Amino acid sequence: MNIGNRIQSLRKMRGISQEELADKVGVSRQAVSKWEGGQSTPDLDKVIIMSEYFDVTTDYLLKGIEEPQQLENKNYNTSQILYIASTTFLAIGLLAAFSSWYTEQSAESIWGSMIIQVVGVTAYFIGKLISRSKAPFIINWLNLIIGLFMPISLIVTFIISKVIAPYPTDIFSSFAFAVVYIIIIILAFFALKKYRK
């Protein structure tokens, strides 16, 4: 394994793009691409920056003498599982709220569902705490749009129909909700894209 392969492996373990690594190191994305492709090697000051960022020694980056810490690999895998679990809990909580509301038609019936969603949010932040790796873009976006569904619905249905419901209950509130929700989904997509750069 050469230095380019080690850089690529560490970058993928961290879950970042070539562009994100380039920003961290202070070079262009093309420079990172050339390093990983074996077409050039980074300057010593860039190797030092990467060793600090990836939490490995310069000896590992330059010569492959020591392996990166196994703990980081384990933490990376655990955090990725927690990120996926967070989305799952948010979705389950949302579906449970729909079911509870449909059978009981009371605001109190959706509290248990909201607790399930809180567990999902907690799983996400625990994943962020135990590893430096970022959640995939799709996980962040799904978490936002699933997590915002009920609050937006509660607000829209209350303003329009004076009813507190986890989903729209009539045609007019459904239309208003759809417009607001689609705008939020689009804004969340572009905001997350901008944040990841």
Image (tube, rainbow, N blue to C red):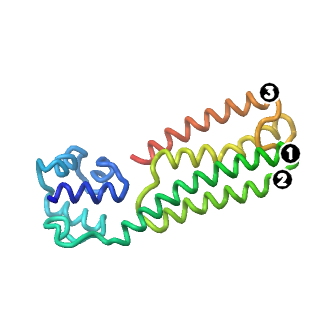
Secondary structure at numbered mark 3: helix
* Front of the two marks 3 and 2: 2
Of label 3 and label 1, which has the lower sequence position? 1
Q: Residue tagged by mark 1?
A: 103
Above or below, 71 against 29 in this view is below
Q: Amino acid at mark 2?
A: Ser
- The residue under the point 17% across, 63% down is 45
Circles 2 and 1: CB atoms closer than 8 Å: yes
Of label 3 and label 2, which has the lower sequence position? 2
Residue 191, percent from left and from top: 50, 42
What whole-number distance in Å separates the C-alpha atoms at marks 3 and 2? 24 Å
Residue 133, percent from left and from top: 41, 59
Identify which residue, 38 or 148, lies in the foreground: 38
Q: Is residue 146 left or right of residue 21?
A: right
- The residue under the point 13% across, 67% down is 63
Q: Amino acid at mark 3?
A: Phe
Q: Is residue 194 left or right of residue 144?
A: left
What whole-number distance in Å separates the C-alpha atoms at marks 2 and 1? 9 Å
- The residue under the point 34% across, 59% down is 13
- The residue under the point 42% across, 48% down is 196
Q: Residue tagged by mark 2?
A: 109
Q: Where is the N terminus found, in terms of image quarters?
A: bottom left
Secondary structure at numbered mark 2: helix
* Front of the two marks 2 and 1: 1
For disc 3, the neighbor class at 10 Å (few under 14, some 14 to 19, many from 20) is few
For disc 1, the neighbor class at 10 Å (few under 14, some 14 to 19, many from 20) is few
Q: Residue tagged by mark 3?
A: 172
Q: Which mark is residue 156?
A: none
Circles 3 and 1: CB atoms closer than 8 Å: no
Q: Amino acid at mark 1?
A: Thr
What whole-number distance in Å separates the C-alpha atoms at marks 3 and 1? 22 Å
